Image: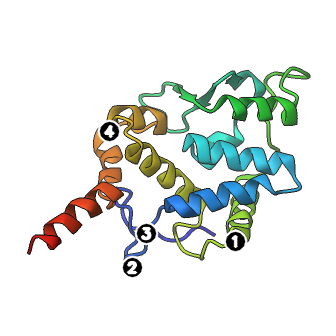
Amino acid sequence: MPHAHSSPASLYSRQGQRKYLSPDERRRFLRAAARLKRPELTTLCLVLAHTGCRISEALALTPAAISKGTIAVRSLKKRGGQVIYRELPVPSELTRILATVHRLDAGDPHRRLWRYSRSGAWRLIKTVMRSAGIASGPHATPKGLRHGFGLHAIRSGVPLHLVQKWLGHASLTTTAIYLQAVGAEEREFAERMWASC
């Protein structure tokens, strides 16, 4: 199932393959998710892409966790035996779609939104990635979506401590891996440097 990765403090596998979706791949994934004929799979894809949460955290979501513009994710990484929730800002359109598809105002507010197993959801996300034309590799996984979210947040100017909070990292050092990836600004600086040689 999942690829073997190098240490979690790296955006690259031991073989040097990147473990994150590029901005273009992320856009293609979102477009492919929007075209799906299964609205509940579309919403899972959107939640993963717009929150950066772990696939197991997404699968544990209930209607009670959703409010306009936010999703409260129960962290699966417990610290000191505490149950920790983190409130994540999301586009209002996402909470509207979740309300419509999952009928958030009807039924048990503590029911799970998705009935997928972790491995079943993992395979479905991989299928959506293939339909988006994303080549196979460690980046073409739900974890690649999580890393893609972290990079997208950093490149959009979100402060590192907020990215840490949103991803549920205990240490800022873990979040700092997203500063390793070469972004457009870094390439622009390098191009200016090479042009002056």
- The residue drawn where x is 32% and y is 38% is 171
Q: Residues within 10 Å of mark 1 (few under 14, many from 20)?
A: some
On the image, the x and y values in percent for residue 60 come to 70, 37
In what element is the residue under mark 2?
A: loop
Q: CA distance from mark 2 to mark 3?
A: 9 Å
Q: Quadrant of residue 63?
A: top right
Amino acid under disc 3:
Arg
Q: CA distance from mark 2 to mark 4?
A: 26 Å
Disc 2 vs disc 3: which is toward the camera? 3
* Residue at image mark 4: 171
Q: CA distance from mark 3 to mark 1?
A: 17 Å
Res 190 seen here:
yes
* Residue at image mark 3: 18
Amino acid under disc 4:
Ser
* Residue at image mark 2: 15
Dot 2 or dot 1, earlier in sequence: 2
Res 183 seen here:
no
Dot 3 or dot 1, earlier in sequence: 3
* Residue at image mark 1: 130
Amino acid under disc 2:
Gln
Q: Are marks 2 and 4 in contact (CB under 8 Å)?
A: no
Q: Is residue 16 left or right of residue 85?
A: left
On the image, the x and y values in percent for residue 65 come to 69, 25
User: In which quadrant will I find the N terminus?
Assistant: bottom right
Amino acid under disc 1:
Arg
The label on residue 160 is: none
User: In which quadrant will I find the C terminus?
Assistant: bottom left
Q: Residues within 10 Å of mark 4 (few under 14, many from 20)?
A: few
Q: CA distance from mark 1 to mark 4?
A: 33 Å
Dot 3 or dot 4, earlier in sequence: 3
Q: CA distance from mark 3 to mark 4?
A: 22 Å
On the image, the x and y values in percent for residue 47 come to 66, 42
